[in-house]
Image (cartoon, helix red, strand yellow):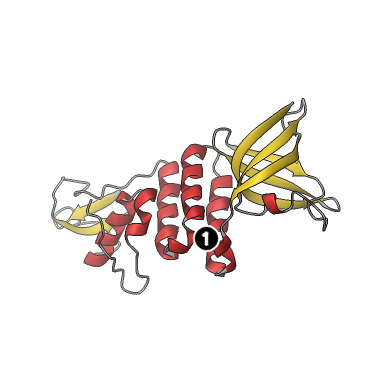
Amino acid sequence: MQKIYQGIILKSIPYKESDAIITLLTQNDGIISFKARGIHKINSKNASIVQLYTIGEYKLDEKTDYSNKTLISGSSIYFPLAIYEDLKYSCLLSFISETIINFKEEYSEAYKILEIVIRNLNKIDILTMTLMIQKYILKWNGVIFEVDKCVKCGSNSIEVFNYENGGFLCKKCMKGYNFNISNLSYLKTIRLVLKANIENIFSYQVSIHTHTHTYIQTY
C-alpha cells in the first residue's frame, strides 16, 4: 500500500551505508518514521527533500507492519534557507523539534507552530520564540498561569509573579510567600509571552538584558 503524507522533517538518523531513518511530523497523523534508501549517495534524487526542517509531501510504501515505511518519492514545498545565515536559527529549530518529538500528543498544534516558525524564520526574535515554546511546553503539561489578575483574590493591583501559587499576586496576598520577581517590565513581559499566540509572535521582542519589550498589540 502506498500513501502520501504532508509533513515536516524533524530528524534524520544514518542507517546502514547510505540510508537514513527519517522522523516526519505530519499534519493529520502525528509523528511517523520511514526509511529513505540511498539518500547519502552523491546521485540520490531524494536527498534534497529529506533535509531537516523541509516542509514537503512524501509518498511512502507501507508494509503490513505499520512501522515499516519506505520513501518512494516526494517533493519539497518549502525549505528555510535562513538556517544557513545564522547558527541560532538551526539551534532554535532543533530545540522545537526535540520538544515536539518528546511529546506524545498535541501534534496538530505543534505542526502549526513549527510551520509558522519555518516559514518566517528570519523574522523571528530568537529569545522571544524560545520563551514562547517554553510556554507551550508548560501548556502541554497542563500548567497554566493566571496573568490577568491576582491568583488569590482577583485584584488587578499586581505586585509579583509567583510560580508556587500559579501566577500574579497582589501586595496583600504576597505576604508570607517567597516571590520570584517584582520588576514591572519583567511582569509585563511574562504576561505578554503567556498571553500571546504563535500568530502574533512577530509583534514584539523580549530583551535579555533589561526585560523590556516593544508593544505592538495590547491584550
| Left or right position of 65 against 49 | right
Give the class, few, some or many, for how many residues have Cα within 10 Å of label 1's Cα (few <14, many ≥20).
some
Asked whether residue 212 is in view, the answer is yes
Q: Position of residue 98 (x, y in %)?
A: 58, 52
The secondary element bearing badge 1 is classed as helix
Q: Seen from this angle, which residue lies furthest bottom?
A: 209
Task: Please tell me which residue lies in front, 68 or 102.
Answer: 68
Residue 159, given in percent of the width and then of the height, sits at 18, 60
On screen, 202 above or below 142?
A: below
Foreground residue among 60 and 89:
60
Q: Image point 65% across, 51% down: which residue?
A: 11
Q: Image point 76% across, 28% down: which residue?
A: 65
Residue toward you, 191 or 19: 19
Q: Residue at x 22, y 47 (%)?
A: 151
Q: Amino acid at mark 1?
A: Leu
**Quadrant of the rendering where the N terminus is positioned:** top right
Q: Is the residue 37 above or below the residue 68 in the image?
A: below
> Which residue is at the front of the view, 12 or 123?
123
Residue 185, given in percent of the width and then of the height, sits at 25, 66
Name the residue located 53 percent from the left edge and 67 percent from the top edge. 88
Residue at label 1?
92
Quarter of the rendering containing residue 23: top right
Answer with left or right where residue 17 lies relative to residue 211.
right
Q: Is residue 16 left or right of residue 76?
A: right
Q: How many marks?
A: 1
Query: Where is residue 24 drawn, in percent x and y?
Result: 63, 43
From the viewer's perspective, is 183 left or right of 135? left
Q: Is residue 164 visible?
A: no
